[in-house]
Image (cartoon, rainbow, N blue to C red):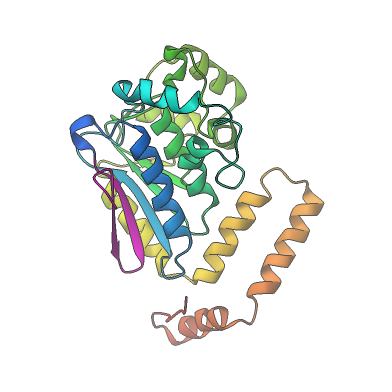
Amino acid sequence: MSDRVRITEDNQVATVTLTRAEKRNALDLDMIRTIVAAGEALAARKDIRAVILTGDGPAFSAGLDLAAMPEIAQFAMQGGVFLERTHGISNLFQAASMVWAEMPQPVIAAVHGYAFGGAFQIMLGADMRIAAPDTRFSIMEGRWGIIPDMGGMVLMRRLARGDVIRKLTYSAEQFEGPEALDYGFITELADDPLARAQALAADIAAKSPDAIRAAKALIRDTEHLGWEDTLIAESHAQEKLMGKPNQMEAVVAGMQKRAPKFTD
């Protein structure tokens, strides 16, 4: 899309790559805007069944570009930037993470090197996160006298205990892949996170896109509901799938022991 983000496609899987490798994919205002635009563009694509989010070079992203801090601060101090909902329920900065959680397709983050600060929050917007064991993480905002404000307070609480979130937010300490896995921030570790993400995305893309999108929406939307509301939501979702062309194709293909041919 630009010198900040590249989108490639293969067999209905889109790979979104941060391409500012010489800066360890550090986040400036242009990159944040382009990340949001990439997510919004893919969310509207019915032919894309899964998305991989990764970074070029030695790191997923080292977080906020300190050289861009004056520009971001000037932009933020224009008045109302933080409180204005420019992207659904989010402001621009929050949308860089929330767009991946909100889009209908499953998103897999393939993470290596670093995922600091804003990049840590962007990674959390994915449905799954595959990381190299030596990847270093940090909720780094406290180091700069600010708080995680890119959707982190929504996304972290889905994954980790409150005391863990407090410790890491207050201290801004760094931790590596095995600890991130124990905390719940990482889904699994892999020596080659991108290859593992590609294999997983290919498997997802081979399933009925109707069922996959319905499952993502159901898991996300019932996360904080009680039993009764969740059971009703399950029933509504299933009613929309049962007997429809892609659902019938899944059954017939399974009985005939062949690859299904789904429509988007």
Above or below residue 66? Residue 105 is: below
Q: Which residue occupies 49% across, 69% down?
A: 209
Tell me, yes or no, if residue 192 can be seen here: yes
Magenta-colored stretch includes residue 29: no
The mark total stands at 0
Picture quarter containing residue 58? Answer: top left
Who's the residue at 54% across and 35% down the image?
Answer: 151
Residue 172 occupies quadrant? top left
* Prevailing secondary structure of the magenta residues: strand
Q: Nearer the viewer, residue 61 or 84?
A: 84
- x, y percent for residue 49: 43, 65
Q: Residue at x 74, y 46 (%)?
A: 225
Residue 99 in the image: above or below residue 240:
above
> Residue 216: horizontal and vertical position, in percent?
56, 56
Instruction: Point out residue 259 in the picture as x, y percentages from the top left corner.
Output: 39, 80
Please provide the residue range marked out in magenta. Answer: 1-19
Viewer can see residue 175? no
- 76 in relation to 254, above or below: above
Q: Quadrant of residue 70?
A: top left
Magenta-span inclusion, residue 2: yes
Between 240 and 4, the one nearer to me in the picture: 4
